[in-house]
Image: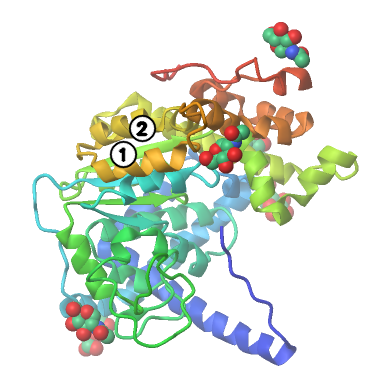
Amino acid sequence: MDKGHTLPQDFGEFLHCMRMRSKFTIFLVFVVALVIIEKENNIISRVSDKLKQSPLSLTEANSTDPSLALSENGSLMSLSELDSAFSQLKKRLQNVTLQLGRTREPLLAPAKGTRKHVLLMATTRTGSSFVGEFFNQQGNIFYLFEPLWHIERTVSFEPGGANAVGSALVYRDVLKQLFLCDLYILENFIIPLPEDHLTQFMFRRGSSRSLCEEPVCTPFVKKVFEKYHCKNRRCGPLNVTLAAEACLRKDHMALKAVRIRQLEFLRPLVEDPRLDMRIIQLVRDPRAVLASRMVAFSGKYETWKKWATEGAATISDDEVQRLRGNCESIRLSAELGLRQPAWLQGRYMLVRYEDIARSPLRKAKEMYKFTGIAITPQVEEWIQKNTQAPQDSNGIYSTQKNSSEQFEKWRFSIPFKLAQVVQNVCSPAMNLFGYKLASSPEILTNRSISLLEERRTFRVT
Ligand SMILES: *[C@@H]1O[C@H](CO)[C@@H](O)[C@H](O)[C@H]1NC(C)=O
Ligand SMILES: *[C@@H]1O[C@H](CO)[C@@H](O)[C@H](O)[C@H]1NC(C)=O
Ligand SMILES: *[C@@H]1O[C@H](CO)[C@@H](O)[C@H](O)[C@H]1NC(C)=O
Ligand SMILES: *[C@@H]1O[C@H](CO)[C@@H](O)[C@H](O)[C@H]1NC(C)=O
Ligand SMILES: *[C@@H]1O[C@H](CO)[C@@H](O)[C@H](O)[C@H]1NC(C)=O
Ligand SMILES: *[C@@H]1O[C@H](CO)[C@@H](O)[C@H](O)[C@H]1NC(C)=O
């Protein structure tokens, strides 16, 4: 993912940056507190309840999230710090929020009974951009591509155990406002801060058709630096008000997020009668994900590469724990979803990327059926165009062969040693999703041996 880091040219600039940064941090802590307090006044007590749970649940928490994999007393310490920080902020800010509440008009989606809100919940390198297009291409859906990127970029909780809990709450509350078309909530997290509700810095604006069509695409007047611009046309800076209005006009809303780790945190959204939520969790073979991440974020995976090829450096335990944490949080979310507790009934669907790669149109239809939204010819056309290889001279589409080659490419790019690490650490998740373990390098690279179990349904044991 585009991180857009720039290195300061000299020390003076560096200091300036640091000063700006700390100002922002203070501001953002404030904003975050506002977000939380404004949306749910009782959240603090709920957080406290969560944090004061028994040590046992903390141990559970550490298995679901890598950033909680600290020494047990370390986690406890930072969690209680967060707790007290929250209560202090609450006291200080309640008055401010009361005043804010009066001036800010709530922007609520009209209570159209049929409006659906779809969350595509994934992790990086699982094909979520591709699958997100299935919804982006439907003209009646207001689709946002990874809006939580802005929050991750600007909000940095102190590192440590509280990080995951704190950010999950912020993500959740921002998500809720976005589903309600309150796009203004994002302005607090966009850097530089938008003025007059205008911004050139909406992350991957061009990946949202709704942000690039009339009337949200305002006439292009003067050339300004626009980091994320529309693909097929030039537009003026994004007017957030226009975007919010467009969001309200569309029949449905969908967004993709790779930053939601735990399904259970979404319960208040799922139970919000205004939202009529549908959650699609997208998973992919963790060996393929690692192979893909090593290419996409190669800097981060230097030690893995060295370890696999030279045997010199060792993979730190931290990194293995992080991998385990990723797999486990995906598995735990999926298990919760598959168990279909009453609050999730009919609202959760698990999809494997591999199944989509092999039969994109069929899976798209299934997903649309699940959401209760009608698939349109444009969506079908887009899928045809983007998944099929050009017609060959025999007039036969080579889709099947081609896409299966595509989705299994990782088998030849990942060293067996690394595949083994993933298998050791992620086998519970792999078992659940039907990804077969490869017991030797020969099996890993033997195309005639499938590493994918054919599954129509998934069983929680
Ligand atoms: C939690 O983390 C500690 C320390 O890293 C580890 O010893 C323990 O096994 C973990 N618990 C679970 C359930 O994974
Ligand atoms: C708690 O952690 C600190 C360092 O993080 C360590 O020095 C201390 O011994 C630990 N205390 C207990 C009771 O484990
Ligand atoms: C809240 O703000 C108002 C207006 O600024 C002020 O008069 C009042 O004393 C404040 N209340 C508290 C409890 O701080
Ligand atoms: C943004 O759009 C709104 C709604 O049409 C309009 O009232 C406002 O003037 C626009 N803002 C700017 C800066 O053009
Ligand atoms: C697979 O499809 C892509 C795009 O449709 C094409 O560029 C590529 O050459 C195809 N590969 C094979 C092996 O047919
Ligand atoms: C690949 O697996 C098939 C089926 O098990 C086997 O017949 C074949 O010999 C294997 N190929 C290689 C190159 O090992």
**Residue 83 as seen in the image, left or right of residue 107:** right
Front residue of 291/209: it is: 209
Name the residue rendered at 32%, 46% in the picture.
135
Q: Amino acid at mark 2?
A: Leu
Instruction: Answer whether residue 210 is visible to the viewer in this image.
Output: yes
Residue that label 1 marks: 380
Determine the quadrant in which ligand 6 lies: top right
Marks 1 and 2, Cα distance to the nearest angstrom? 7 Å
- What is the number of the mark on residue 361? 2
Instruction: Answer whether residue 285 is visible to the viewer in this image.
Output: no
Q: Position of residue 153 (x, y in %)?
A: 51, 66
Instruction: Say which quarter of the image contains residue 289.
Output: top right
Instruction: Say which quarter of the image contains residue 300.
Output: bottom right
**Residue 37 as seen in the image, left or right of residue 205:** left
Front residue of 308/232: it is: 232
- What is the number of the mark on residue 45? none
Q: Amino acid at mark 1?
A: Glu
The answer to whether the residue labelled 1 contacts the one labelled 2, judged by CB atoms less than 8 Å apart, is yes
- Identify the colour scheme used: rainbow
Q: Position of residue 366 (x, y in %)?
A: 30, 29
**Residue 302 as seen in the image, left or right of residue 343:** right
